[in-house]
Amino acid sequence: MRINRQFFINCIMIFIGASIFSFGLVNFNMANKLAEGGMTGIALIVYNLLHVDPALTTLILNIPLILVGLKLLGLEPLILTLVGSLSLSLNLWVWQKIPLNISVDNDILIAALLAGICGGIGSGIVYKYGGTTGGTDIIARIIERRLGMTIGRSLFTLDICVLLLSLSYLSLKEMMYTLIAVFVFSRVVDFVQDASYGAKAVFIVSDHDRQIGDTIMKELDRGVTYINSEGGFSKESRQMVYCVASISEMSRIKEICYEIDPRAFMTFFNINEVSGEGFTYKELQELHEQAKKQK
């Protein structure tokens, strides 16, 4: 792992994103009895039923998950996840101590919209700079590896389970407003980050294609494909690097390209679905088993 200026910028932006997310959670979700998905949703359930500070609950729940995810995440993503988790707990504690009373004139719909906007902006910033706030993100990766379910589907399923459990302290009316907040949250994250969960693809054109490809494979453990291409103006033959990776890994791919070749040309685009090694482990295992049987 390289400790450089960009790494510190990532940590600072993750802290800012966690602060915005925590602000919305305290002043809109908690203040208006709105639930939340993921690990923070579980923290709100514990808060409403047992009156335990969410700052403490998220910290206690995230630490063992981060330790379990150590083998899955790698060193740098693990540190960024740890930064996000600690930032979330710290900011939840701080915002609860600051006496703010943001009036929405008892309009829960406005509160739900503001909760979704704040949460989406905060989480979008965290994801954009390669971090997570721990919790269900790690669980989703474990489910992906063990059961073959994609991260996006895993997170959606986990969020639905948490929201259903939230009915233990919410009325159906409050739950419906929560669903509005969750919908707005997802759309705002899409706007900030292009996609909450899933993957993106990148084409890289560079005179140092092999070095860039080797570095991506070594540091991120992502496969690359070299595609023969020809420059329209130069008429020179070269190889273009193609790589599919998670959203949070794209920032590191940019850094790798600029470190090796500042003139590298990169094209990023969203993909709706991806399967194969690194994304759907179950399908890969089935292929291995079929290959063994054929032998």
Image (cartoon, helix red, strand yellow):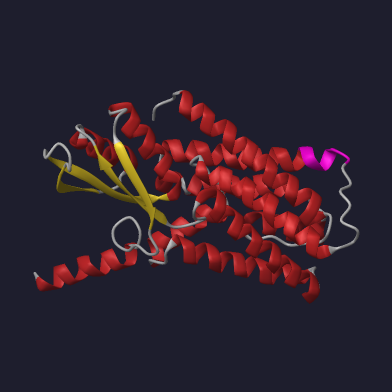
Label the magenta part by its dominant secondary structure: helix
Quadrant the C terminus occupies: bottom left
Residue 215 vs residue 230: left or right?
A: right
Residue 113 vs residue 123: left or right?
A: right
What residue is rendered at 82% in x and 64% in y? 108
What residue is rendered at 44% in x and 57% in y? 198
- Residue 120 or 69: which is nearer the viewer? 120
**Image position, residue 26 (x, y; %):** 78, 49
Q: Quadrant of residue 219?
A: top left
Furthest toward the left, the residue is: 295
Disc tally is 0
What residue is rendered at 47% in x and 48% in y? 69
Furthest toward the front, the residue is: 233
Residue 66 vs residue 102: left or right?
A: left
**Image position, residue 223 (x, y; %):** 26, 48
**Image position, residue 255 (x, y; %):** 38, 33
Furthest toward the bottom, the residue is: 172
**Image position, residue 178 (x, y; %):** 72, 66
What residue is rendered at 56% in x and 49% in y? 192
On screen, residue 108 above or below 58: below
Q: Is residue 96 rendered magenta in the image?
A: yes
Q: Is residue 107 visible?
A: yes
- Residue 120 or 58: which is nearer the viewer? 120
Q: Is residue 252 rendered magenta in the image?
A: no
Q: Is residue 53 visible?
A: no
The residue segment tinted magenta is: 94-99
Quadrant the N terminus occupies: top left
